[in-house]
Amino acid sequence: MNRLEEYNKKYGEYLIDKEGDYKCGKCKKIWLPTDADINRKAMMTYYKNCGVCRLYLYNKCIEYRNRET
């Protein structure tokens, strides 16, 4: 399997010029991505999660790191 096939397998549903709707990977709702939702590691795709879910996961990660163990 070459790199292009792996890229399409991983990000195929979230390409920027894709026809159809984008479905959030966490909440499974349909969302409309904006320019702020472009993936910084894979510049030809959007993030897999909607903005609300990404913010929620970010805050939970910060809370986990700050928790005293």
Image (spheres, rainbow, N blue to C red):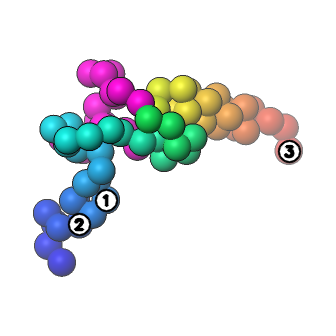
- For the stretch drawn in magenta, the main secondary structure is loop
* Element under disc 1: helix
| Residue 8 as seen in the image, left or right of residue 27 | left
For label 3, the crowd category at 10 Å Cα-Cα, with few meaning under 14, some 14 to 19 and many 20 or more, is: few
Amino acid type of disc 1? Lys
Does residue 22 show up? yes
Mark 1 Cα shell of 10 Å, populated few (<14), some (14-19), many (≥20): few
Circles 2 and 1, Cβ within 8 Å, touching? The answer is: yes
Indicate the amino acid at tag 2.
Glu
Q: Which residue range is magenta in the image? A: 31-48
Residue 31 located left or right of residue 12: right
Q: Amino acid at mark 3?
A: Thr
Q: Is 32 positioned to the left or the right of 6 in the image?
A: right
Q: Residue at x 14, y 73 (%)?
A: 2
According to the picture, the residue beneath numbered tag 1 turns out to be 10
Pick whichever, 11 or 21, lies toward us: 21
**Circle 2 or circle 3, nearest the eye:** 2
Instruction: Give the residue pinned by disc 2.
Output: 6
Q: Secondary structure at mark 3?
A: loop
Q: From mark 2 to mark 1, how far is it between C-alphas?
A: 6 Å
Earlier-in-chain disc, 1 versus 3: 1
For label 3, the residue is 69
Which of the 4 image quarters holds residue 40?
A: top left
Q: Position of residue 32 (x, y in %)?
A: 35, 27
Q: Residue furthest front?
A: 20
